[in-house]
Amino acid sequence: GEKMRIGIAGYGNLGKGVEYAISQQPDMELVGIFTRRDPSTLHPIGEKVTVYPLADADQYVHDIDVMILCGGSRADLPEQGPALAKLFTTVDSFDTHAKIPDYFAALDEAASAAGTTAVLSVGWDPGLFSVNRLYGESVLADGATYTFWGKGLSQGHSDAVRRIPGVQNAVQYTIPSEDAMAKVRAGEQPELTTSEKHTRECYVVLEADADAAVVEETICTMPDYFADYSTTVNFISEKELQEKHSAMPHGGFVIRSGKTGENTNQVMEYSLKLDSNPEFTSSVLTAYARAAHKLSVSGQHGAKTVFDIAPGLLSPKDPAELRKELL
Ligand code: NDP
């Protein structure tokens, strides 16, 4: 049949990842990239891909089935989400957990009025991890759910270290605590705070006259960011940082530990190990774009989350094929 026509709104890490992901999907084609910057300054991976001003997006409503929103959660999506949902069926990776209810309401109003479908907060967390938390607590009603993040690069924590006087460059990884994971997997259902579940690892390049001991102390005692965590600081050269720490790995674990019957332990575990957080998130966005299109075509409009979307809708295969091959 006809290919699903996709637009990309915003061309950062996710935008590039979506461009790659679309090229791997048999039933999708990229119509164009939309940006707030001067289109001539962007260089898409595909040489023939056209870049349009985002302000002109309303001229393409009949050419695009789903607009994949790749803007940032903090400043871009709260504005772009509802504005673009008035024009297109959309999918985004909004990840400010505390603001999801407000964002849902704004999208639901825009999409319901326009007769579009707006799928929000898709990715891995929120996204695939959310689905697994839901499976866990629905299946094992008596139990506890644990989310561990990492090993992952944290942009916010890396920035915080870079702002310390004497620091030339730095990256920070969040790492799940082996001790805590072992307790959870053993069915002990411990009470754990976020800082008990994770440790932090920093790789720091010092400026020429900086005092390593002072920098290390400043990092380890930084309130909110490091003070409550077990933190290790490694000093390395700029060359080593560029060579070994310029990727954006991430991942983590969702574990549900529960009891059934008399006192039977049951543990459900889902894990991700990602060499590139944005490329993976983009791949999830692309699969959910397919579901968004199917919902939109079938008249199911308004805002939807991963909880509202049946898994079969993510696949390019039809339901009969899926029953035969994957059930
Ligand atoms: P980026 O900062 O790379 O891009 C965000 C926007 O900034 C782009 O859409 C682009 O808009 C603009 N931009 C990008 N590069 C430049 C540049 N060089 N100069 C000026 N503007 C630029 O963010 P990411 O793509 O890495 O992430 C987007 C969001 O995805 C994050 O805010 C995060 O919340 C979310 N996310 C969600 C996950 C999940 O699991 N749910 C996982 C990972 C991320 P324009 O082209 O219009 O200028």
Image (cartoon, rainbow, N blue to C red):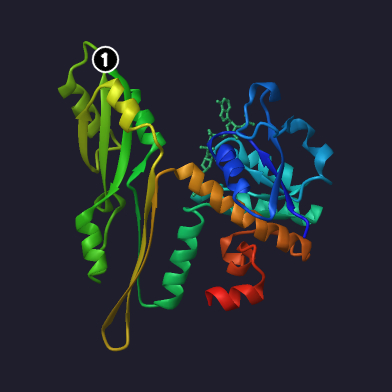
Splitting the image into 4 quarters, where does residue 84 fall? top right
> Farthest residue in the bottom direction?
262
Circle 1 residue = 207
The single residue placed furthest to the top in the displayed view is 209
Q: Can residue 285 be seen in this view?
A: yes
- The quadrant in which residue 207 appears is top left
In the rendered image, residue 17, in percent from the top left (x then y), is placed at 55, 41
Q: In this view, does 67 lie above or below 188?
A: above
Report the front residue among 41 and 177.
41
Q: What element carries label 1?
A: loop
Residue 259 location, quadrant: bottom left
Q: Ligand 1 near label 1 (Cβ, under 8 Å)? A: no
The image quadrant where one finds ligand 1 is: top right
Foreground residue, 101 or 19?
19
- Say which quadrant the N terminus sits in: bottom right
Q: Residue 80, position in %: x, y?
A: 67, 39
Left or right of 233 on screen, residue 299? right
**Viewer-proximal residue, 15 or 58?**
15
Residue 301, position as x, y percentages in the image: 74, 60
Give the total number of marks visible in the rendering.
Answer: 1
Q: Residue at x 70, y 25 (%)?
A: 39
The three-letter code of the residue at mark 1 reads Glu
**Residue beneath the point at 31% across and 51% down:** 194
Residue lying at 62% horizontally and 53% vertically, measured from the top left:
25
Q: Position of residue 230 (x, y in %)?
A: 20, 43
Drawn side of residue 166 relative to residue 282, left or right? left
- At 59% from the left and 50% from the top, the residue drawn is 24
Residue 39 placement, left or right of 142: right
Q: Can residue 170 be seen in this view?
A: no
Residue 150 position (above or below residue 1): above
